[in-house]
Image (spheres, rainbow, N blue to C red):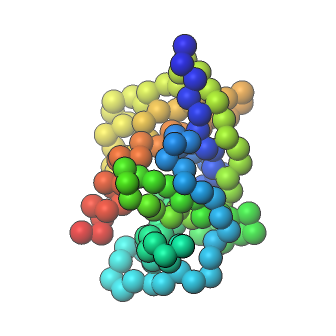
Amino acid sequence: MKNIQMVVFAVGKEYYGIDIFCAQEIIRIPKNITKVPNMPSFIEGMLNLRDQVIPVVDLRKRFGVENTETENDSRLLVLNLEGMLLGNIVDDVSEVLSVGEESIESLYVEIAHLGNNCIKGICKVEDRLIMLLDVTKLKNEIFASVS
């Protein structure tokens, strides 16, 4: 069986995982995010990160988490989504995890097609469930809502 490595992060009370190869870096949330007018509420703005301008998304707002206040543990998880950098505000980045493919279950087809769902599977790790994000769907979902 093949092992999959993922970065695990929290948004609200839920845990999400994303392929480690998509994670570019994890930093404290910068103060200099520039607001862009007429964007959806979950787009925080743009950020100049080492001479590269990247969009910043608040995943708490995007995933409908009620408390969207930035805490001390909040981080900016910078992802490389098929060649495009995207900053994601998350509540905490907890670990890098290696799991076997057998511990990942696909979503039921009926659930996978509800709304704008970018979840590709659920990983069972001890007593918790980690939702695995599909980076292609996440990128398409975010930028479809902007256009």
In the picture, measured across the screen, residue 58 lies left or right of residue 37, that is right
Residue 112 in picture, x, y percent from top left: 36, 37
Q: Position of residue 100 (x, y in %)?
A: 59, 21
Examine the image and state in which quarter residue 70 appears: bottom right
Furthest residue toward left: 147
- Residue at the top extreme, as displayed: 1
The answer, for residue 63, to whether it is visible in the render is yes
Q: Eyeballing the image, is 69 above or below 99? A: below
The residue drawn where x is 59% and y is 69% is 68
Query: Relative to 14, is 35 above or below?
Result: below
Q: Residue furthest front?
A: 51
Residue 66 in view (yes/no): no
Q: Quadrant of the N terminus?
A: top right
Image position, residue 13 (x, y; %): 65, 51
Where residue 8 sits, quadrant-wise, is top right
- Check the image and report above or below for 61 versus 118: below
* Residue depicted at x 54% and y 54%: 24
For the residue pair 31 and 68, the one nearer the viewer reads as: 31
Task: Write the residue at 30% across / 69% down.
Answer: 146
Foreground residue, 129 or 18? Answer: 18
